[in-house]
Image: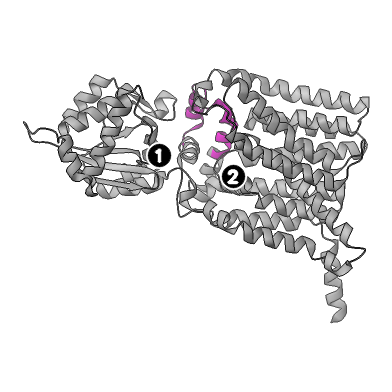
Amino acid sequence: MSSRIAARRRRLLTLPIWWIPVLWTLALGLWGLPRQHSVWRDEAATWQVAERSVPEISHMLSHVDAVHGLYYLLMHGLFEVLGPGTTTLRLPSVLAMAVAAACVTVLGHRLAGPRAGLGAGLALGLLPSVQFQLQEGRPYALVAAGAAISTLLLVTLLKDRCRARRWAAYGGTVLLCGLLNWLSLMILPAHAATLLWTRAGRRVWRRWAAASAAATTGVLPLILFSRSQSEQISWIPPLTWHMLIGPAVLLAIGGLGALLDRPAAGRLSAAAVGLPLLAVPQLTLIGLSLVRPLFLDRYVLFSMLGLALLIGAALGGAVRAAAPRFPRASRWILPVTVAVALVALLPQSLAERSPASRVDDVMAVAAHVQRLKRTGDAVLFVPAARRDTALVCPEDFTGLHDIALRDSPEDSGTLKGVEAAPGQIRAAMLARHRILLVTDATGVASPVSAERDRVKISVLRGHFAVVADEEVRGRRVTVYERRAPGHLPPTRRAASRGRAGSPVGIVELVEEEVDRGVAHGG
């Protein structure tokens, strides 16, 4: 019996260590994956596009969101096979980050030892930005997985004999990442920094340059075409000093990890790979943002691979330093550190898995619409992008008439459709007795700026009265009924009387704020 137990232990010890971070990351990703059946606006874009046909997706990409075209086609295939749902929406990100954790583990093992590899793989899944994207129905986790694979291929090529097939695999992986999001090409200067650090030979440089050039050339048409759709990112704010605090902290932690790794010039080490992978994409994105506002941390999520690698190297170094004097205690450094980090980050981990972690929830407001609606009612969206809730949950809007919509999103090749002229919207509203308005909650709503939306608010204020008003998870649904002929709209004095907390008083106050925003050019 004892011999069987010993044999099992030997088999476990001979298993590759990367399976531990894979299971760890899968557990973190599957934990609370549905987020109480909530979907926010970014994921709603993925959901509604994935449900379109391939010709409809191609038509849309010619007008908007071409940068995510490959991802949308992938999600369309998954929705066709598995059916739409929050699990189908987010499972690719969970699996992709598990692949990234495996690659980081192997990298750490090869560059700094088994404990460094295990620490790097476990640390990756705990990083806050990774935990956010781990359960996100967007392409950034897939890009991180591709970046991890390409980095592992590069290290393999530097440590072993250069082979044409491996260089082709490297170039193909970078190309695939670029097609998922062309900003991922920032990994190429990071890899170039690693080649400089390790004093790679001319042959390596030539083959790397050829593979990189081929990948960049393959992505170039997408880059040029998507630049014509740059209006999509016009909402990103200009770079400020406050926005640089996060990158500065990450670089400081990464720099400390590199120092603890004690890298030698010309040697392939965790620092030589991890520090450029962390710093170069972050600094490059900051530089690009000085020319055009572009700074969003999700665009460089793959740089967290470098941070995890450096953290793993630091943990491995701590174990090696303690082993001679404290051989037994040194074995506990890694598990205790991971346990402490897990406990310390538990409040944030729980927060990331709640609906409140996102700006809004299209599912929640759709359920309220379903409860408040009456067959034959009209529905309006302010701004028009809030139509996403009806596109994701069409069954909850059955029986409602979208009176502002002229061309559907599918026909127009857009995400939100094309609305009628302001005069037509006004006439359609005045022909209705009851209208539901879906918009943003008071705390997150922006001032109304589009002429069509100004008309909607103006007609509702002048000719309709509020009979119900509810807010839920960043969205708001208000029910209006037509006033009797000759009935004047409520005065500001009446609005002030309603400020004690009644739904009508709250809505009127918000509408006054909207008016002030419009008057000041909002």
Residue beneath disc 2: 133
Give the x, y percent position of residue 47: 48, 40
Residue at 63%, 59% (x, y): give it: 344
2 in relation to 281, above or below: below
Quadrant in which residue 154 is drawn: top right
Q: Crowdedness of circle 1 by 10 Å Cα count: few (<14), some, many (20+)?
A: few
For residue 199, say whether it is visible. Answer: yes
- The label on residue 444 is 1
Q: Horizontal placement of 323 versus 295: left or right?
A: right
74 falls in the magenta region: yes
430 in relation to 317, above or below: above
| Quadrant where the image shows the N terminus | bottom right
428 in relation to 331, above or below: above
- Disc 1 vs disc 2: Cβ atoms closer than 8 Å? no
Q: Crowdedness of circle 2 by 10 Å Cα count: few (<14), some, many (20+)?
A: many
Residue at 40%, 47% (x, y): give it: 473
| Quadrant where the image shows the C terminus | top left
**Does the magenta stretch mainly form a helix, a strand or a loop?**
helix
Give the x, y percent position of residue 454: 28, 25
Range of the magenta residues? Answer: 51-75
